Amino acid sequence: MKDVNIAIIGNPNVGKSVVFNYLTGKYVDVSNYPGTTMDVICGRQGRYIFTDTPGIYGLSDISDEERLARDIILRSDLVINVVDAVHLERDLFLTQQLIDTGTPIIVVLNMMDEAKARGIYIKTDVLEEELGVPVLPAVAMDGEGLGRLFNKISLARVGKATPQLQTLLGSGDLPTAAALMVAEGDREVAARYNVAPGTHRDTIYGRRRERINQVIAKTMRQIKVASTTGEIIGGLMLRPLTGIPLLLITLALMYLIIGVFVAQTVVDYTEGVLMEEYYEPLVRHLIGMVVAEDNPLWVLLVGRFGVLTMAVTLLFGLLLPLIVGLHLVLSALEDSGYLSRIAALLDRVLMGMGLNGQAVIPLILGFGCVTMATITTRMLGTDRERLITIFLLAFAVPCSAQLAIITGMLAGLGFFYMLAYMLIIFTAMVSAGAVLARVLPGTSSLLWIDLPPLRLPRLSNVLRKTWVKSSEFIREAAPLFAGSALVLGALDVTGGLEAIENSLVPLTVTWLGLPKEVAGSFIMGFIRREFGTAGLFTFPMSDIQKFIALTTLTFFVPCLATAMIIFKERGWKQGAAIWLIIFALAFIIGGIVAKTIALLGSIEGAAVMPMLAGLTLLILVLVMRLSWLNDRFSKM
């Protein structure tokens, strides 16, 4: 039998990926904020081929996501349109546009439980009759209603089009969907058929909105109900007076979970006991039975940079527990709906960096994976905002693996080291954003973001997401760790490593004040920053030297995977410029921090790290004040 191509279409954050996961058995990242799906993902079930698409508000040639969804629909045999029952009036506009394409449709009316909690009642039988297509009420996260979806697919049909639409489509030979796009002024589709784009968009949109209003009047009623606990807390998260303290409490809890419990208690056991007391001696004993200790192969396998010792211990003893802990926390935040509220809360702060609050989402996601967060910047409204955010991600946002190592190392140094580090990173990020906002043409766009309902994260989804991301990290990082260890081991055996360390002495020793062995960490950092950061554990340093090395490596060039995505998203010229600028800035900032600490240390009786934190805070306030004034004057 012929394959059936089915597109899953809907507004952002309505549950499309949940439906896709259910239908295909494949896992696609599911989160409670708009813009989770930025790529097209396909899965097969029998002869049905399902395509999950980014969330859109309409079909047009305005944005990349809408163009992508439009082209998928033009090639699809039918569409599953996922609709948020809480926002029925908004979502039905896209539903009606899909119906107007003449494509067979089935509507999944999701989040019926939340609609009921808000006093919204929908007559699904009347809605089905009005639209002319099957309507399936569902609570997708619980799987409720989706069991009947497979049986309903064969019932999908063409619905009732917007009144008097045909007179605007003309009587040409174009397929209905293409004719609709042309009539609505889609220049790309018009060019494909060598016809002039139409000028009926406003007329069609007006009639479509009028029809939806009539459908809503017949199918939905809402009664006033008391605010839920989630709505009350969600409101408090948006007000600066209560939202800022709640954000600080959240960050403090994250530190206690990851920086204290996982980084100290758990890692002390996995790295210090399991790997160093049991695993490494066992491996060295086994290898020593067949290879002599003075043999170069023994050094490569179980020496200082051994593939079977250092690489395995860093990956599984140090990184894996930290990665799992961080992804557990980030996954819970993503599913709670809090990220969108942080975006709204910090909108004004980000305006001074040439962004709006929506940029908070990729910036926070960068603490999980900078590569994925770089792709997520597509959700931002303008190319200028995407460029600024990508630069900031590559420059000042450590990924989960690097952040976990940094947290573990700083937690052992003390509170003021942690405070000074956070202030330096935040100040550098704000300063870079302020400079880019100043030199790049254009202004920040206004924030338009849907606030999803505040929900308790579902444990099953949080665990599954953590498992998927952590296992992906291990699969991706293991060969790179092994390869890097092999390269370092070979350089160590041949004397090449010492030659490189000696050649970099003016930079590492004279400028940064670090031992020359730290050059090996920077070499590893070219591949993955977290591997370079983890390498700092392999030789002794003072607390101040650890702080300077961590700070410099935080600003170091992005890992290979992120660099490739940056080149893909921005082109080779901008990609190369971003990479080179960040490379230079890392050593400039690291050197300035080292010289400042040396200067403060020369003051008799000075508390160096508290003074460094205070000085950095002063610079931060000055930068934010100047960027705010610049933003204010640019609007006058």
Image (cartoon, rainbow, N blue to C red):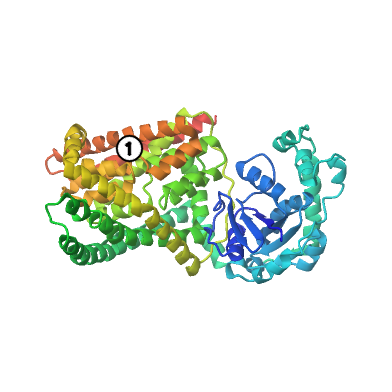
189 on left or right of 454: right
Residue visible at 27% across and 54% down?
A: 311
- Residue at the outermost front position: 290
Res. 120 image quadrant: bottom right
Say which of 338 and 471 sits in front.
Answer: 471
Quadrant where the C terminus is found in the figure: top right
213 on left or right of 399: right
Residue visible at 59% across and 63% down?
A: 24
Res. 447 image quadrant: top right
526 on left or right of 89: left
Q: Badge 1: few (under 14), some or many (20 or more) residues near its Cα, within 10 Å? A: some
Residue visible at 38% across and 40% down?
A: 395
Please count the marks in the image: 1
The local secondary structure at tag 1 comes to helix
Say which of 234 and 282 sits in front.
Answer: 282
Q: How far across and down, in percent of the image, does residue 400 sit?
A: 37, 53
